[in-house]
Amino acid sequence: MRQGRGILLPGPTHRHDSDPYTPEFFKNALGTSYASAQRIVPLVLAIVPARSVLDVGCGTGHFLRAFREAGVSEITGIDGDHVPRDQLVIEAHHFVPADQIYTAAHVSALLDMWQRAERSAGELSLQ
């Protein structure tokens, strides 16, 4: 992993034998996350009804899949380029590869952009 200020994202140039992001990791460990997501997502939506979800560090998209199945119309996942596209459980156009360190300012800007887009969509639907 590369280290610096902000959020750490693994980079393909720093892979080695102890890299946790192996194909087996995505097949096995993340497989259990979908079962967790199916239980957690309805609880989250009961507290915060959402029309859109941005998942930074989404892996292969199990939580996003559960949000979509629960009726959330807009989903976007961001994770490193190491995520095998053939194992995504969401449509590929909902996945954004990002092999760089995102600072808090980058993430904040992404969230602001997401919220503005959601507000604009809401204003359009009211007209």
Image (cartoon, rainbow, N blue to C red):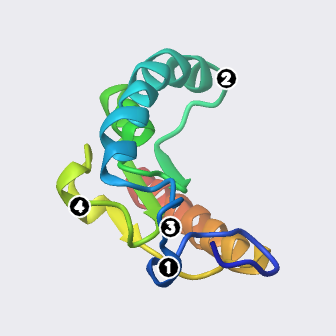
Could you say where residue 117 lies in the image, as x and y percent from the top left?
50, 67
Badge 1 is on which residue?
99
CA separation, marks 4 and 1? 14 Å
Q: Nearer the viewer, mark 3 or mark 1?
A: 1
Viewer-closest of 7 and 109: 7
Spatial distance from mark 3 to mark 1, Cα to Cα? 24 Å
Q: Which mark is residue 12?
A: none
- Mark identifier at residue 85: 4
Label 2 to label 4, Cα distance in Å? 32 Å
**Residue 15 on image: x %, y %:** 48, 73
Residue at the spot x=27%, y=60% of the render? 84
The answer to which of 19 and 7 lies nearer the viewer is 19
Q: Amino acid at mark 4?
A: Arg
| Residue in view at x 58 percent, y 73 percent | 113
Asked whether the beta carbons under mark 1 and mark 2 sit within 8 Å of each other, the answer is no
- Quarter holding the N terminus is bottom right
- Identity of the residue furthest to the front in this view: 17
User: In terms of sequence position, does the residue under pointer 2 or pointer 4 come before the other?
Assistant: 2
Kind of element beneath mark 3: helix
